[in-house]
Image (cartoon, coloured by chain):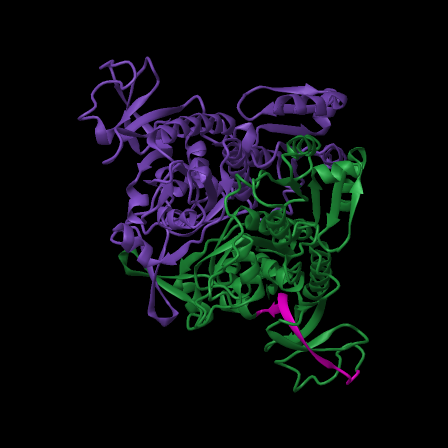
Chain colours: A green, B purple
Amino acid sequence: MKYSQLFGKTSKTVASDADSINAKLLTQAAFIQKQISGVYNYLPLGLRVLTKIQNIIREEMNKIDGQEILMPAMTQEESWITTGRNTMEVLFHLKGQGDTNLVLNPTHEEVVTPLVQKYVFSYRDLPLAVYQIQTKFRNEARAKSGLLRGREFNMKDLYSFHIDETDLNRYYEIVKQAYFKIYERIGIGQETVLTFASGGNFSQFSHEFQTLNEGGEDTIYLCPICRVAVNKEIIDTQKTCPECGSDKLEAVKATEVGNIFKLRTKFSEAFKFYYSDSQGQKKIVEMGCYGMGPSRVMGTVVELRHDDVGIIWPKNIAPYQIHLIGLDGLGEDLYQELLSKNVDVIFDDREISAGAKFADADLIGIPIRLVISQRSQEKGGIEFKLRSEKESEIIEAKDLVSKIIKFYN
Amino acid sequence: MKYSQLFGKTSKTVASDADSINAKLLTQAAFIQKQISGVYNYLPLGLRVLTKIQNIIREEMNKIDGQEILMPAMTQEESWITTGRNTMEVLFHLKGQGDTNLVLNPTHEEVVTPLVQKYVFSYRDLPLAVYQIQTKFRNEARAKSGLLRGREFNMKDLYSFHIDETDLNRYYEIVKQAYFKIYERIGIGQETVLTFASGGNFSQFSHEFQTLNEGGEDTIYLCPICRVAVNKEIIDTQKTCPECGSDKLEAVKATEVGNIFKLRTKFSEAFKFYYSDSQGQKKIVEMGCYGMGPSRVMGTVVELRHDDVGIIWPKNIAPYQIHLIGLDGLGEDLYQELLSKNVDVIFDDREISAGAKFADADLIGIPIRLVISQRSQEKGGIEFKLRSEKESEIIEAKDLVSKIIKFYN
């Protein structure tokens, strides 16, 4: 893609109400554009990042036998009355034709439970895990923090169904490992810690995945030995590390990027979701739910991976692999060559100053910046610089593609 | 995928309110499941088909320089007041926190125009085309016909922006050709005809793409010579073929699968969207919009491609390439071999009668059915049958994969 043709250009100024680093940088770099508070448009660069995050999540969900489905945003309020959650403050209510009462789902237990119930009758149909990557709606009193707390946002929600608690516990651990794998692939694995949270009425704990970062909206209590944490909600009752028992927990700032929860029989009881066991006895289904918001993860990555001049994308979710800057009328041939070798490249072909192009490359944050200019050619090739490093080097044209491939593999 | 593990199994019975062939067959075959009138869940088989249709559309949009973005479903009502369309009957209205008035978008002119306006200032920024594949909402008085007329549905909407009418006309023709390419790839090219419709205040005609089928909800007037049609809305003023002038138009039933429209300056005027031309003069932007609903296309394919016993998927959008039936305890080895050769196969491994498996394969409608049984092996191999043909043949194991590849290429 030529930057001159790309829809959405960088902007030095940003709306005065950008209340967070991710909103500010993603808007300035033209990844997103606010529609209303908590509701964003994704421009081409932003959608590319979001899609890459979704695809990593999708691959890992498929590996643990999650089956992808797609449930609707809009649902009869009746389902929410069944579970008693129709009074949730964040529910958007609306009227359909014929004065029917509808809601926009902020989560999908009220949809997935009766849906799965239509097809699961016997112990032979279990265990089962289904997930979707879909748009959710929450009528937040104060939407804030860019992509972190939206009123319309993207969510991956996985739901699992089991014959008993033992099997739920088994699968819950599998999902936990899949989550760590996802954060690692996205590039925030080092900073993301398992955090013990309230388990509600049915289980001792649920778990959040919290990404440590100074601007985080949550305070968690981290065990420096185990690298697990306790969240604020339960720290008064759980004062020690749940794994090693240490009482040396440190308060740190973090952003939640996922949570997993043993629902047990809360929703299967509400919908009377039973199965027949191998003896033909009627038994209640055990459930788990596992959330991760691709848009929230995208915002969190920016909170964590930036410097004073812009974003620093991890390589697996960068919108492009290469940011090519052409100076002195050069670049077109190299751009075509990279395209022909299937390198994912954005080429800044504009007739503006070198300084302005460098500033935009820093702001946008693609991992590798290449500069081709008379000066680089006099030095013997193309300037190669990682966004995460200060120093650049000159690479001979013949070595360029193999160096790029090596970096990305 | 093993059918025994697949979420969503076939059902002989179907909800009594299935009002169309597509709703009936897609529900019986467990591709979709109704949530409320006009709102459906996509089960794994259904989501695979929908995704394949979306990807074909995406590829063809990218080829004509459409840039993919993602706009929100929820928007301030104010934008709709600006264009005077806030009184549209199909608009869902809702209240956000702080008593703000919000709507769910049934189309996105009110979002895309001010969004593009933020980044387009000069003739150098034009032409530009952006599209999204996204969920839309229409508060239909009577949602009906399965996936054909939904209250929540999937839509591809492309919008183009131009310096003048000439350039809009140029791009409009390019989109027209891309649409034909899409229908051809999806497998309904032969039956889909360009249909002249009202152009509104600004242009003589807009165009619909109508797929001829006996169960279609629209009546169109087809020129047997040119294979173009005139829609019902304008037949009283346009009594002859707009291409050859023939007055021998035939009334036929069809289903609309896309429409393209020259918006001209309707929305750019409402939002005061101007650009500077090469002389620095302020000029109004010309716009086009181009819709195609992947979910509606999916429903239309089923209306067109089925027989008394089930669906007959075109090969490019079938949920799987191969429906493998194992009898007499056979099939696992062949299933593993096909998987290892990257053949996209669903394996009916259930312990039920051969007849029940054959009936399910016919209902689900995957293009190639393979049967491995003692009998097929005695005959020298594997039974190979196209869903669209009555006769089967026996293929030697060694020739199987190449035959499959040949069919799909």
Residue A72 in sight: yes
> On the image, which quarter does residue A234 sit in?
bottom right
Up/down of A183 relative to B286, above or below: below
| Residue B365 visible, this angle | no
Q: Position of residue B129 (x, y in %)?
A: 45, 38
Taking the image as shown, residue B103 lies to the left or right of residue A400, namely left
Q: Is residue A317 above or below residue B369?
A: below
Q: Is residue A147 left or right of residue B21?
A: right
Which one is in front, A70 or B134?
Answer: B134
In this view of the protein, which residue sits in the foreground, B385 or A220? A220
- The magenta-colored residue range is A246-265
Q: Quadrant of the image for the N terminus of chain A?
A: top right
Q: Residue at x 55, y 26 (%)?
A: B387
Q: Quadrant of the C terminus of chain A?
A: top right
Residue B205: where, in percent of width, then height? Answer: 28, 29
The number of discs equals 0
Percent coordinates x, y for residue A390 in the rendering? 75, 55
Left or right position of A78 against B392: left
Which sits in the foreground, A236 or A316? Answer: A316
Residue lying at 73% horizontally and 57% vertically, measured from the top left: A184
Please identify the dominant SS of the magenta region. Answer: strand
Q: Residue at x 33, y 34 (%)?
A: B262
**Residue A256 sits inside the magenta stretch:** yes
As displayed, is residue A385 above or below residue A335?
below
Q: Is B312 in the magenta? A: no
The image position of residue A16, as x and y in percent, is: 46, 65
Q: Quadrant of residue B239?
A: top left
**Image vertical order of residue A225 relative to residue A179, above or below:** below
Q: Residue furthest left?
A: B236
